[in-house]
Image (spheres, grey):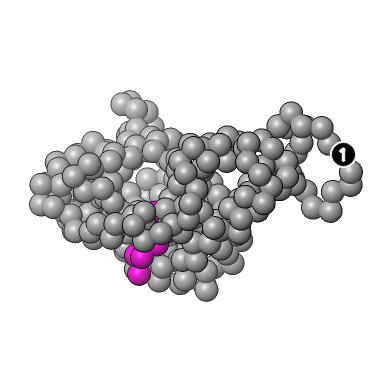
Amino acid sequence: MNARGEIREFLTSRRARLTPESVGLPSYGQRRVPGLRREEVAVLAGISVPYYARLERGDMSKASPSVLDALARALRLDDAERAHLLDLARAAGPRGRRAPAAPEAGTVRPVIRHLVDAVTGAAAFVGNDRLDVLAVNRLGRALCPGIVASGNLGRFLLLDPAARTFFRDWESAAAAVVADLRTAAARYPGDRQLTALIGELATRSEEFRVRWADHEVMLHHSGVKHLRHPVGGDLELNYEQLDLPADPRLIIFTFSAPPGSPSAEALAFLASWDGASSPSR
C-alpha cells in the first residue's frame, strides 16, 4: 500500500463531500470542483494553508496527535474515519512511529474452536480482518455454505454470483466488506496476503474497484442481516461481532434470531438438516 497516496486520496475525498455552508463558512467565488478548498480546511483545523497542503500530499511524518485530531474535526470525520486517518498517518510516518509487524491472523487457538463448537442456537464463525473464515460451527456451515466453501467473505460476496441471492441487501453487504478491507489495509500495510487479496478483487471485480475508490470506512460490530437460504428461505438475523483481546486480529461473529420468530424456526430446521452434520473446521 502506498500510504502517501492513500492519505492524499482519503483527505481529498473527505474534503470534496463538505460544503462551506455545512461547516459554517461563507461561500464565495465559483468552484471548479465540489467541496471545500484547501484553505478552508486549513482555517477549520487552525493550521496554515501550506502545512495543510503538505499533509494532503501525504507528508504526515511530523504531524502531532493534536494536529490529526484538529484535521479530523475540520473534515467532520466519524469514529471509523478518524481511526483510519491515524492508521494512515502511522503507516506513512518515520520508521520509529510505524506500527509493529502485524500479529498472526490465521491461527485459531483450540479453546476458541471449542467455544465456537459449543454454540448451538446460533451460527458462529471465527474470522480475521482479511475476512478469512477460519472456523465455523455446525449451524454456520448449514447457514452459509457458500461463504464456508469460499473460505473468504470478500471473495464470496464480490466474485460468486450466488452471493447476490444469498444477501438480500447485497449492496450494503458489499459496501461493508470493502470498508473492512480498507481499514485492515491501512492498519497492516505490510500484510502480503491482504495485499494479494485486494489485488485479486480489484482485478476481477468492477464493483470492488468502484467502491475501493470511494475510500469509505465504517464500524460494523452489530446489525441485522437479511439472507435468503436455498433451504431455509428468507431469514432476518441479528449479527454480532465479538473481539478477542488475546488474538487482536481475530473475531467471533454470530447470526441469531429472536426465540419464537420465523427465522428462529428456520435456524432450528437448519440445525437438524443433514448438511449441518460436520463440526467446525
Please name the residue shown 58% across and 53% down the image: 55
Nearer to the camera, 274 or 235: 235
Q: Is residue 229 left or right of residue 202?
A: left
Nearer to the camera, 93 or 172: 93
Please name the residue shown 18% across and 54% down the image: 108
Please name the residue shown 49% across and 37% down the image: 66
- Disc 1 is placed on an element classified as loop
Where residue 168 sits: x, y (%)? 51, 47
The image quadrant of residue 246 is top left
Residue annotated with mark 1: 28
Nearer to the camera, 142 or 154: 154
Amino acid residing under circle 1: Tyr
The image quadrant of residue 99 is bottom left
Where residue 147 sits: x, y (%)? 36, 58
Q: Which residues are magenta?
A: 185-192
Q: Is residue 229 above or below residue 76?
A: below
Q: Which quarter of the rendering shows the C terminus? A: bottom left
Q: Is residue 191 above or below residue 172?
A: below
Nearer to the camera, 50 or 226: 50
Where residue 232 sits: x, y (%)? 37, 45
The image quadrant of residue 190 is bottom left
Q: Is residue 269 above or below residue 11?
A: above
